[in-house]
Amino acid sequence: MLSNKILWFVMTMILCLAFCGEIVSATEKSVDYEAISAQIARDVEENHIPGMAVCVVDKDEVIFEETYGNCISVEQPFIIGSMSKSFTAISIMQLQEKGRIDLDASISQYIDASEWFINPTDSNEITIRDLLNQTSGIDTYQTLGKLERTDSYGTHVYANANYGLLGLIIETVSGMSYEDYVTENIFNPLGMDHSAASLEKAKDNGLIEGYRNYFGIPVAGEADYPEAIHNGTWTNVPAGYISSGCSDMGKYLQMYLNDGEDIVNEESIESVLYDNVSVNNGSYYYGMGWMYSEKMYSQPILWHAGLVENYTSNMFILPEEGIAAVVLANMNDYLVTNNIIGNIINPLIGEERNDLPDLYLILHGVIDVVCILLCTLSVYSISRAFHCKNKERTLKATVLDIMVYILVPILLLCIPFMVNTPARVLWLFVKDLCIVIYANATILILSGVCRMIFYKKETNAELN
């Protein structure tokens, strides 16, 4: 009897110690959101981000929610860019659960491929799953109406056209517009009252003004919001133009943490997140509108970023911690904002913050100096164009002319090929640099032509 009491006492003490250990562990993992929020406010100011909204949730409640800059409310919507793809994937899974879509069926069973592919038979080998995982063989910058299945079929290649096609499939199968479908089947059931899949509705909801960055200066301007999908479409709503606020996105992320709630079943959530394909030799994996990695952070993480002309966003799920976070910014700045969002969000998800230099001044300063030098060269080329005498035609002058009037403009015009990005896409996202590149290339070429004409006249005059 005494031995039983001793055993009971020992077991009770062990359980108490274990419980205390859990309390200590939880305390050690506690996050100082007040300090993190103050740091985010400094980041927003120092990096000239007009507005930002941040939200952290677990499956039951909002843990942290705050706005910065000119964002006036956690409900105020931003355009969320490619985070829209996950909404399209969830819509597809809903239709699959109802037996109206087979993920492994050819897409030609659901849409008229002849309208979107150069060779309609290409679509016979592409399945809905291929579109979701972006393994369809469609290249990144292909446009709808001119699609081709390339040799990359089966390998992940990120392409907006994949999710544009999924949007068309949703419309065909459901008999509803994409906007109406996601509103009735995702936004409304989750209480996402400030989310939309059209520009008109986004504005009605109070869409925050977006900013492009021109030479380091944020300039307000409307996004190039895409029209309905048609021939020539590259960007499209199902791939990148849903609008939502951080409060609504918190509700959306809680749906994942709660295994789909009443939106989709747990099996569909597992498929969207983990039925994935390798990217960059396994450095991370692409599922269905979500990416997954066990290497990028100290624990497994799911995420997807979003980027359009004047908005930037990112969302994260930490499956082991059971928390999720989203950050929305109303500026597209390839040099800085798009690269520091990870640093801003890191402390919110329990990661170390990186010590970064003043990237804003460094990167924009370097680019601005290069732009000034290029403009100076163009002014110099104009001044030389009408001061050309035959006696000045030395080897040094000839080499200089070839460099200024031929090589430099060719180099500028080849930049889209060098960065493997079409000029039309560069124009959407870095208008300031495009203006400098093409304006100066044009000036240098015209100045070179004028210099040749002037030189020929001078030569004829001397001969006569």
Image (cartoon, grey):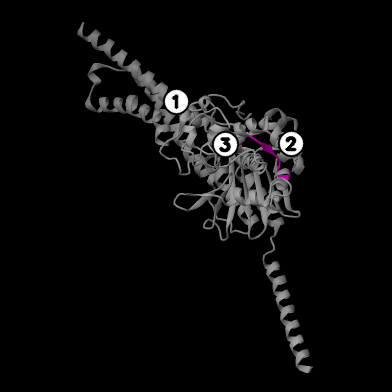
In the image shown, does 297 or 266 lie closer to the viewer? 266
* Quadrant housing residue 129: top right
Q: Residue at x 30, y 16 (%)?
A: 452
In the image shown, does 259 or 104 lie closer to the viewer? 104
CA distance for labels 3 and 2: 19 Å
In the image shown, does 335 or 375 lie closer to the viewer? 335
The magenta stretch spans which residues? Answer: 240-247
Q: Viewer-nearest of labels 3 and 1?
A: 3
- Name the amino acid, label 1: Tyr
Mark closest to the chain's N terminus, 1 or 2: 2
User: For the image shown, how many numbered marks are present on the structure?
Assistant: 3
Disc 3: which residue: 163
Mark closest to the chain's N terminus, 3 or 1: 3
Disc 2: which residue: 184
Q: Residue 245, image x and y in percent? A: 71, 41
Asked if residue 351 lies left or right of residue 203, the reply is left
CA distance for labels 1 and 2: 45 Å
Asked if residue 74 lies left or right of residue 394, the reply is right
Residue projecting furthest to the left: 463
Q: Residue 45, image x and y in percent? A: 64, 44
Near mark 1 (Cα within 10 A), the count class, few <14, some 14-19 or many ≥20, is some
Near mark 3 (Cα within 10 A), the count class, few <14, some 14-19 or many ≥20, is many
Disc 1: which residue: 438
Q: Residue at x 24, y 21 (%)?
A: 393
**Residue 160 painted magenta:** no
